[in-house]
Each structure stands twice: as C-alpha cells, then as structure tokens.
Amino acid sequence: MSTFTKEMVEEYADKLLIGLTEEESDMVLSEFDTIDKNIDIINTIPNIEQVEPMSFCLDDFEVDLREDEIEESIKIEELLQNCDEVSDREIEVTKVVG
Amino acid sequence: MSYMDKSIKEIHKDLVQKKVSSQELIDESIKKSHEIQEKYNAFVTILDGAKPKEVTEELISGIPFGVKDNYSTKGILSTGSSNTLRDYIPFFNATSIENLLNKGAIIVNKTVLDEFGMGGTGTTGHTGIVKNPWNPLHMCAGSSAGSACAVAAGVYPYATGSDTGDSIRKPAAYCGIVGYKPTYGMISRYGLFPFASSLDHCGVLTRNVEDAAIVVNAMKGKDKNDMTTWDSSKIDLTKSLYENAKGKKLAYIKELCNIEYYKNADETLKKHLENFKNTLSICKELGIEVEEISIDEKLLNAIASTYVVISCAEATSNMSNLTGIIFGPREEGKNYVEMIKNYRTKNFSPLIKRRFVIGSYVLQKENKDRYFFNAQRVRRLLVDEWKKAFQKYDAIILPVGTGPAPLLKESKDVIDENTKALEEHLQVGNFGGFPSITIPNGFINNLPVGVNITGNCYEDEKVLNIAYQLENKMNYKNQIAKENNDEI
C-alpha cells in the first residue's frame, strides 16, 4: 500500500504551477514509493545531525562587491522581442484587478 | 581534404599558412552538420549563414565550433531543448561564448541536450533523441548529447557542454572523446540556462586533452555577472600538459573498481573493470604511483540520492522564471496564474515534470530537514572523503559508468532502485566543484568506454597533465566515430 496518493502528487506539482495529465499523474504516483525509498538512502548514513549542510562547493570563496556604477542597459524594444503580447513599450497581461 | 577531424593546433597552422581558409572550414563543418543531423539528430539549429573570421594568433580564430543549446547566443535560437523556449532568441551571449567569439571562434550550430540538462540519456530534447555515431541503436548519454555526437563524428574540433551531474563526462565516454569540466567558478555561468546552480559547470567536449585545455583557456575568466567566478588569469591550462607525469600519485576506490564487490556482474562489467585495470597499468608505466583506497560503501551508495534531492530541489527555483509571459510561447488563461500554469503544463515534458515533483516534495516544510538538508550534509561527507584522498594523491582515477553506451530501447530516466554507485560517482565532482576529465580508454562490444580523472579544486593543471600523458600512451586520441552496427 503506497503512502502517497494522487492528490498528494498533484499538490506537489500544483505548488510549482504545474499541472499533471492523468497519465503523468499515474506515472509519477506509480514510481513515488521507489523514488522515496531511494532518496531515503541519505538517512541511512549515521550521525549526520552534526554535519554542517553544504550548499556551495568552494569553501574558501570570497565575494568582492563590485563598484556601484551605472552601466548602459539593454534597450526595452530589444527585451520585448521575445514577448508575444506587447503594447507600446509594455508587456500586456490579462487584467489582474476588477 | 578534410580539416574538421583535425586538432585545433593542426587547423590553426594551416590557416596561418593559408593552406585553408576560415570560409572553407565553415563550409566543411556545415556540410557535415547536415549529414550528421540526418543520421543522428544532434542539432536544434544549423547556422547555414555562418560568416568567416580573421585568423589571428589566437589558436581558435577562424575555426568553427558547436554550442550546447542551453547557452544563450545573441540573435540565435536558444531553446534548452525545451518546448517552453522553442521560440526564444536571446539578446545577449553567455559570457563564455562571448569569450570564444572575441577570440575569433565561429558558431556553426546549436546542439541538442536533454531538456534543460535534466537527463542523462540524450532522449528527452524537444526535437527528438540523439543517436550514438558509433552505433545509432545506442544512446550518446546526456545531457550534452548533441555536442558529444558532433565532436565524435568530426563536425568540428570542439563543442561546449554543461555538467551538473556528469553531463559532459559521461557522453564523452559513450562517444569515445574527451570531456572536461574545470573547477567550479573558473568559467562563468552567466547566460547558461541554470538547472542546479550549486552544481552547474560549463565545460567542453573535444577529441584530445590539449584541445580541451586550449578551449577552456579561451572560455574562462572572472566575470562581474557571475559572482561565483574567480580570477584564473595566471593559469595557462596548456602549460603543464607536456611535463613528465612521473612521480604523480593516483588513487582508485576499491569498492567501485573491484569486481568482487558486484554480485552477479555481467560480462560487460567484467570487461569494463578489466579494461580499467589495464589503464592503471599504463599509468604505472608512466611512472605514476597508483594505490587503492577504501570509502564506506554506505556513503558511496548515497551519491545518487544526494544528487537527485539537491538537483531537483534547486531546479524548482531555477524554473520559476519560465512563465511564458515575458518570453517563451504564451498560453491563454483567465488570469496570469492560469496563464503560467497552462504554459508549464503544456510545454514541460513528463520526465522533467517528474523531477520537479520530486523537488517540490523534498522542499515541503515537513520534508526539508529529512531530505534537503540531510542531502546537503551527505554532500559534505562525500566531498570530505574525496578531499581527504587529495591530501595524499594528485587525483582519483575511476572508470566511467558500468560499460559502454546502452541501447536506446533500454534507455530510461527512472531513478532505479538498484542504481550502482559506479554509474553515478562522477556527481561527486559536482558536489565538490572538482576539476574532472574523461578520456577514452578502449572499446567494449565495438563501443567506446572512458576513464575519468578528478582532482582537487584549483588543481586543473595536475589533472590535465595526467590525462594528457595517459592519453598519449593509449591509442584513442583524436579518434573519429566509425559507424558499426554489429551487435555483439
């Protein structure tokens, strides 16, 4: 008996604004126990509570803050070229308020 | 006479002596691109109108190359092999590409990858599967599948790749060529479509180690647009290549390399590990000391899980800008949330959706410590083990994968319960940001296999030196794929 349900899987996807088709939902659900079991291997490593999580590979890295200088920016017309719906120099979206 | 199957230095020499022109090189490369596209489906875009450039003292000037389609290229379609960006044309170049172009290199095509780099088979790009040029029934591996295929087939001397788990180094092995990712931060990631930012590396696929060093020399450099880059201006990666490797020390991990650790090992795995041991003998002939080390199997078996958790979690935040509103093909909806959801639902492939679901699952409040933070803890333990080895050894040498390229019909992107640490160990190179190179070291069942050398951060020169010397002592340097359809 799986510990996961279709609703749970769909909720995980929905939180990322992704919808799953019936087929996709079934595929993910059918594999989720295996996926969960596999990633749980991490928790078989003993005494990891005291280990500092590693989020970046270079532990000796120093970041220099760059000078606060004004630079030439890309032309708005150029930026809008990849947008499907544009009105003058603005991106058009479906009405949000009222 | 063909040029695109030669090394960069050989081509450069003939360009300087005017035995060939940049235009002739482009013509040859474009012609081969179309032939290879027909046979193996390696490209998203072929730039038929590519223009020649002046030949200067820069070794790569006037010479064509390929770009993986997750690098932004100004004015050239850049899709990440995803339907979500099937019409996206960047208004800027990725810094590393800009660096190559400034030195006179010429882009002739954009190569297919697994969607946004999130796959290891070369079968999930939106333009279809990439076939292996040694045998089209087999995969190239991924995600830099098109780049590996094209370089192996002799379309040009090099193509860029990116590597989050092993995406340069495994396709290199399956295609019988060289794949090199330098230390994290040596090459700027600005303009590379991000997958998992703490693991993503830029790099290159070539047919020999010297070319890899030449190209990364040209790609690298500190970049104000990528805060994780560091100053490598004093490093010339070609300099150390020619030094004698005698006295260098290599280690291999017995739990990964010794056949007795594999119950029911098949013939292919036996041959692969035997071949690896032969390579170790060649290292010894070069005067390199080779020793066996041991790492807790439990920890090695957690590599794949650690990778899945961290990469899927990081991917979920990196995909947040894919809305279809500012760029990408827009979808209809009653409001902007619905528009975004429709766009993602319709355009992400099922396999990538599954990875996002895993990422979402491990980041849920109730799971975050158990999965995400614990994966980051295991990441540190693994990196510490490798670094401990680097205190005594110049590099770790290991076989790539469990054998040659699997058949495409056996291709899967499922996180297998029985995934072997041998198949996934290259991911530690990404956990630690280590310089790591794969070179071809033989053939099994008429298909190429590779060996990997990985060193400590900032010690790229040592890794390249060992790889170059080893390559020269074997017979697989500069090989071009010859199609062989005989199944053994």
Image (cartoon, coloured by chain):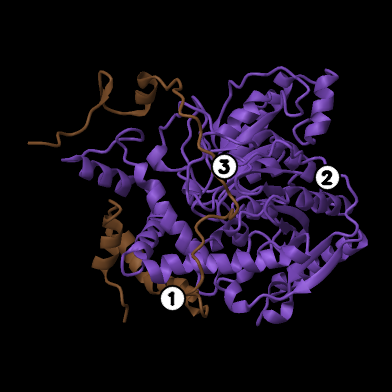
The x, y position of residue B272, in whole percent, is 74, 67
* Residue farthest left in this picture: A98
Which residue is denoted by mark 2 in the rendering? B240
Question: Label 2 sits on what residue type?
Answer: Ser
* Chain in purple (letter): B
Quick one: quadrant of the N terminus of chain B? top right
How far apart are the two marked residues, 3 and 1, measured between alpha carbons?
36 Å
Q: Which mark is residue B177?
A: none
* Chain in brown (letter): A
Q: Secondary structure at mark 2?
A: loop
Quick one: quadrant of the C terminus of chain B? bottom right
Question: Label 1 sits on what residue type?
Answer: Lys
Disc 3: CA contacts within 10 A as few (<14), some (14-19) or many (>=20): many
Q: Which residue is at a point 58% across and 41% down the rendered structure image? A: B229
- Of badges 3 and 2, nearer the viewer stands 2
The x, y position of residue B247, in whole percent, is 89, 60
Which residue is denoted by mark 3 in the rendering? B41
- Of badges 2 and 1, nearer the viewer stands 2
Which residue is denoted by mark 1 in the rendering? A37
Q: Which residue is at a point 65% across and 82% down the rendered structure image? A: B263
- Of badges 3 and 1, nearer the viewer stands 1
Question: Label 3 sits on what residue type?
Answer: Asn
Using the rendered image, report if marks 3 and 1 lie on a common chain.
no
**In front here: B261 or B373?**
B373
Q: Secondary structure at mark 1?
A: helix
Instruction: Please say if B462 is above or below B252.
Output: above
